[in-house]
Image: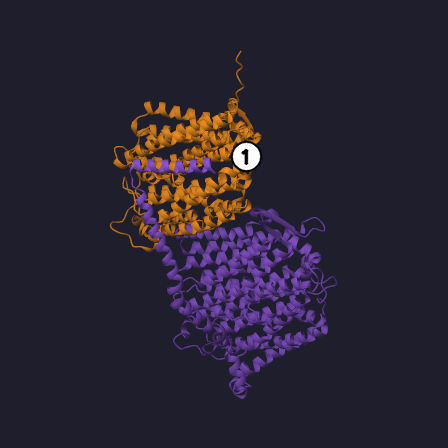
Amino acid sequence: MITIPPVHLAVVAPLLVVGVTALVVMLCDLVLPANERTWLAYLSLFGLIGAMLIGTQLWGRQTSTFSGMFLLDNFGLALTFIFLTVAVITVLLSVAYTSDRGLVRGEFYALILFAVMGMMIMATAGDLIVVFLGIELLSLPLYVLSGFARPARDSIEAALKYFLLGAFASGFLLYGIVLIFGATGSTNLLQIASVLTKGAHNSVMLYAGIALLLVGLGFKVSVVPFHQWTPDVYEGAPTAVTAFMVAGTKAAGFAVLLRILLVAVLPVRDVWLPAIAILAVVTMTVGNVTAIAQQNIKRMLAYSSIAHAGYILVAVAAGGAAGTSSAIFYLLIYAFMNLGAFAVVIAASRGGEERLAIRDYAGLARQRPVLAAIMAIFMLSLAGFPPTAGFVGKLTIFQAAVQNGLTWLAVIAVLNSVVSVFYYARVIVFMYMREPEGEPWPAVAGDGRRMLALALGICVAGVLLLGILPTPAYQAAQTALLNIL
Amino acid sequence: MIHLAWLVPALPLLGMILNIFVGRRLGRKGVGLLASAAVGSAFLVSLGLFISLGGLPHGVHQAEQTLFTWIAAGSFHVTVSLLIDPLSVLMSLVVSGVGFLIHVYSIGYMEHDKDYRRFFVYLNLFVAAMLILVLANNFLLLYVGWELVGLCSYLLIGFWYEKKSAADAGKKAFLTTRIGDVGFALGILLIFVTFGTLDYSAVFSQAPKLLQVGGTTATMITLLLFVGAIGKSAQIPLYVWLPDAMEGPTPVSALIHAATMVTAGVFMVTRTHVLFELAPFSQSVVAIIGTLTAFYAATIALTQMDIKRVLAYSTISQLGYMFLAVGVAAYSAGIFHLMTHAFFKALLFMGAGSVMHALDGETDMRRMGGLIRKMPLTGWTFVVAWLAISGVPPFSGFFSKDEILAAAYHAGHPILWLIGLITAGLTSFYIGRQVFLTFFGRSRVAPDLEPHVHESPSVMTWPLLALALLAAVAGFVGLPSANGSLIQSFLSPVVGGEGGGSFDLLLALLSTGVGLTGIFVAWLMYSAGVVSPTRMAARVRPLYNLLWNKYYVDELYGFLFIRPFRRTAAFLAEIFDPWVIDGAVNAVALVTDGASRVIRVWESGYVRNYALSLLAGAVIMLAYFVLR
């Protein structure tokens, strides 16, 4: 007699809402006339915000369903809110972007929604198999989205590179999962933890599994030396997609990394901690140093995102309540800063033509003073200047590191953020202190400008509000701790 | 009503923000009206707070309003909260009330300025900063207001920044007060180290337990705080910025000298009086510096010929009186004089501004005279202010100054009292001299200006009349009675019922006599012509020169501090910076740049290379985890 375990659909309710919305968007695409496609964006926003509202109702509850495959806790919910916020902003800035570049195709929003669903699965997964499912559900739409600007050559190149290397990395990830299963006899995160606590595991196999898992996840969050796809893909992919990847994929990858390292394999922290710390140092340093030499703004932001992955690894290494909450808090801030910076790149474009070289931003302050001021805010926040959110975020991470005895790591991180000022400030220097080159770039009034402005407004508000009044959000992040048995 | 307290600083801030963003669409008239209305409504809210203070339950004299938690980092917890008690409400009434009149006056005064909107934006911010300062319930928020006030003074004194002297004066004010601010910041840090909190209520309630009377910590804290007050309130030796501050537009001078900024120090000492009472030495320092400043600045004012410069030294001198008061623990007397001084000093400045407005910016009193015939409103209101500052009964200055002198006398400081008394005589003399030179006698106005001399528009004279009324009658809240005066009993929940406020007929008669003597001598010299001022000056030439040149203090500071500083700065700028610092920075940049180029080679763009490096990374990871 097979007993069917009880199912709490409430646990996965936000997930279901996003999934259903994705399907409805796909269907509507079939019946809507080509010039009415903006409705798909509205529909997507409706679903995303609905999922968010349902999520708020679940805040504070702790349970699991599908035999522990999915977990409901504040950690997962907090990350879910970040993903949904990222998706909302992405949709808002995509309307203008796709119409400017003639990319208005219905599957765009459906793919974004499916990718968000993948992220949400990753953050709420209680089992390594579900983690893998989530990663694949996230990755497949992203491969398509990276090549969405077809037939543009660099977009197709980005998609192909991302797909080939992503498949390669997925292999490592899967192999890692298999080894961990072999070592502990389970793929359930909580059960793995209890097996490890008892010490009833095969150490070599387990450690090899963790190593390969870190390779696979490190690829997703662009940790050096698994990062090399990042600049090429971020540069080639359509800017709206890049923004989504930078903010969303990284948050999802770190959600999994935090859950696995700080729950499942926490008992062997002594083993993985040095590796994570070294990866953090290498990632920060390579990201920052390479960013200095970049002439293309999207590549520069790509390396900057690698450097930021290093900062978040510092939080992971710090671990504990302080590390977890500072990582969540930073991921939120990071999402606002990067989405904002990419939104400026989109808003500063002229029709289909984008300002891609940092040189193109010369004199922007003269031509588009508000836009330049907004960009300056994001750059200062990325560099970590008060009173922006970037400062508070870095502060909480460094504090967590010092509290947990990793002062040397915090010092290296601070030195790194000093280096980073160089290339962020350069954008400001170009915007404010250089004469514009060539013809002025007038602001274009196209479709979705209002939505783009709204997206920019949300990001600016987020960066300033979290910088000046960080306490409420940080306190929420502090309650978003991991469910440890 | 109390829960609306946040509106008091928020309204001027709102006025500022609106003027920044939509001011251009409002037109000149709208900008000025909006800014004035913002401050005016802040005054109305303060008035509401004043009324609702009386409505508090019996025995409760204060309320706090927490707006939000600002910083919560471990044990360091700071909220943005307002403290509504008699002292803060009285201060907000003075700041917003006088501030409002100055705003209205500025509508007329700044009418022809091209940067009309910028002026009102700064002015609103200034008032808002001062209101934050007085309403704060903790030291950090106080410091925020304190620094914002400093910033605004810099912006407004240097408002006409194309003029070098104005830009320099702005810098001078900022740098000089910064010296004091460093002390102030250190004092606040020491408070945090000692008490572990920055909230007034917690600090003041723990102070008697944690600090010894006359102990080193108490003395250090209070002296450091007082250093801040010396800077902001222009006392010896940091007063030098205030006379130069008149480079700003005259309404700004009125605002700085009367309602905001300089009163911050007196307010702060009163607010932290619990700490000062634990440090008798610091109290004596406050009283002595105050008295010396009062006398010293009054002597300089005797000889100055610039209509605003006389008033500037007069402000320094009057602030000295206030510090004398708070130094002898007569806090309500100090705050009382702060209030009456706000009225008559704003009036004097605005009167001087009105004169300058009529004379095309002329400030030299040697080219004035007889103006009362052409500008009667300005003239007569100026006379009211003169009588007030001279302590002629029943004008307001009589009550407040007399209370201070009586307090000093009864507190057992006869020498300070005597110096204060002499200063009172000097005060009535130099303002009298100013009145006679400016408004009476025959006209020495330049002939080409003479026909254009006119009374100012009513938007400027109405504030003058309102202030004249206040300067005349405000003293009655200090009218002595059996239970102490009105203002004393109003402030007693904050500063406690103090002695020294008792009315002493003999002392009052004496100070009135001295005041009248000063007026009489001024009349003899500058109106009746019985004594010739030039012959007087010739007879005491060295002394006169010393006073005329303001004791050469600016020159002394230039020699002692500014020149060595300049030399050091030049060395740093021309030798140290380009070679050592830039060299180091450039070297770092060169190395990083080189590294960056090397790493870029790694970034080949070929998928096969990327896969290979991914594989290599995986091998290293595996090797670490398996072989460790």
Which x, y percent locates residue B154? 47, 63
Farthest residue toward the front? B627
- Helix, strand or loop status at disc 1: helix
Chain for numbered disc 1: A
Q: Is residue A102 visible?
A: no
Foreground pick, B240 / A188: A188
Q: Give the number of marks.
A: 1
Residue at (54, 78) in percent of width and height: B302
The correct choice, above or below, for A139 with respect to B181 in the image is above
* Quarter of the rendering containing residue A174: top left
Q: Residues within 10 Å of mark 1 (few under 14, many from 20)?
A: some
Q: Is residue B210 left or right of residue B82?
A: right
The correct choice, above or below, for A218 with respect to B113 in the image is above
Which x, y percent locates residue B557? 50, 74
Q: Is residue A344 left or right of residue A256?
A: left
Q: Is residue B408 visible?
A: yes
- Per the image, the residue denoted by label 1 is A267
* Quarter of the rendering containing residue A459: top left
| Chain the render paints orange | A
| Chain the render paints purple | B
Which x, y percent locates residue A189? 51, 29
Which x, y percent locates residue B307? 49, 73
> How was the colour assigned to the protein in this rendering?
by chain
Foreground pick, A195 / A349: A195
